[in-house]
Amino acid sequence: MADVSRETPIVEAEPHDTVTAVFGDRADLARRYTASLARHGEERGLIGPLELPRLWTRHILNCAVAAPLFAGRVGDVGSGAGLPGLVLAIARPDVQWVLIETMERRVNWLTEQVDDLSLDNVEIVRSRAEDWASGPSLDAVTARAVSAFRTLIPLTAPLVRDGGELILLKGANAPAEISAAEKAIRRFRLTNVRVEQVGEELLDEPTRVLRATVR
């Protein structure tokens, strides 16, 4: 009898209408990326096996519904598997994305995906955020599942031009993260710090976004 505990988890079925609504004519690119992540993500240390049964809703669409918030040249700190950077680059070909990742194996993955999907709006930088050499040059910086807000502020705010934004994908604890980051908010002169929800009309669990203006 087969050991059920060792069976490969079933990948979540695509919510076709939602994927089409979010990605439009780029839905096929999203499908290709998601299929690659489902196929190779666990073996390459990008996602855990428990994520496959919720890959579309918890990860791909959770990132993609935030796409309308971005413009210009945007950095994704700790891009990892490409969540959110690659997903957002698929959804927003009019935005320039800089994927900042320090681990070689993840940089290799990101490079493979960019080449396979022919994404000409993506630059990959192998670096730690604190070693970013281009100064405050980005219009916005995003991150997802990297660290608490108070830790992210000194890593992300110095990359953003005056008047640019931090647009960070967060969980249900986002309001508490703002309270815990009061000192860093003052130190880095962040204004208009708030939590917004996006995708409420598309997802059962909307995406929480922590936004702040850098001055």
Image: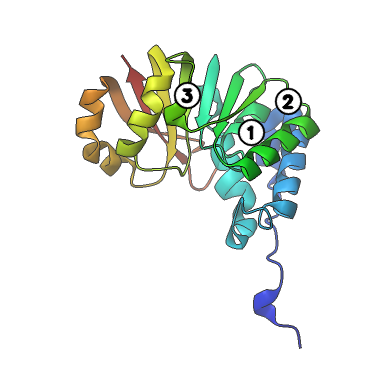
Mark 1 and mark 2 residues within 8 Å of each other at the beta carbon: yes
Q: Are marks 3 and 1 in contact (CB under 8 Å)?
A: no
Instruction: Give above or below for 206 relative to 123.
Output: below
The quadrant of the picture occupied by the C terminus is top left
Q: Mark 2 packing: few (<14 Cα in 10 Å), some, or many (20+)? A: some
What's the mark number on residue 75?
none
Q: Residue 212, image x and y in percent? A: 34, 24
The Cα atoms of the two marked residues, 3 and 1, are separated by: 20 Å
Q: How many labels does the image show?
A: 3
CA distance for labels 1 and 2 = 9 Å
Q: Name the residue under label 2.
A: 119
Element marked by disc 2: loop
Amino acid type, label 3: Trp
What is the three-letter code of the residue carrying label 2?
Leu
Circle 1 residues within 10 Å: few <14, some 14–19, many ≥20: many
Task: Report the Cα–Cα distance between label 3 and label 2.
Answer: 23 Å
The image quarter containing residue 82 is top right
Query: Mark 1 highlights which residue?
Result: 86
Residue at image mark 3: 132
Residue 31 position, x and y percent, is 75, 41
Residue 75 lies, with reference to residue 203, above or below; the image says above
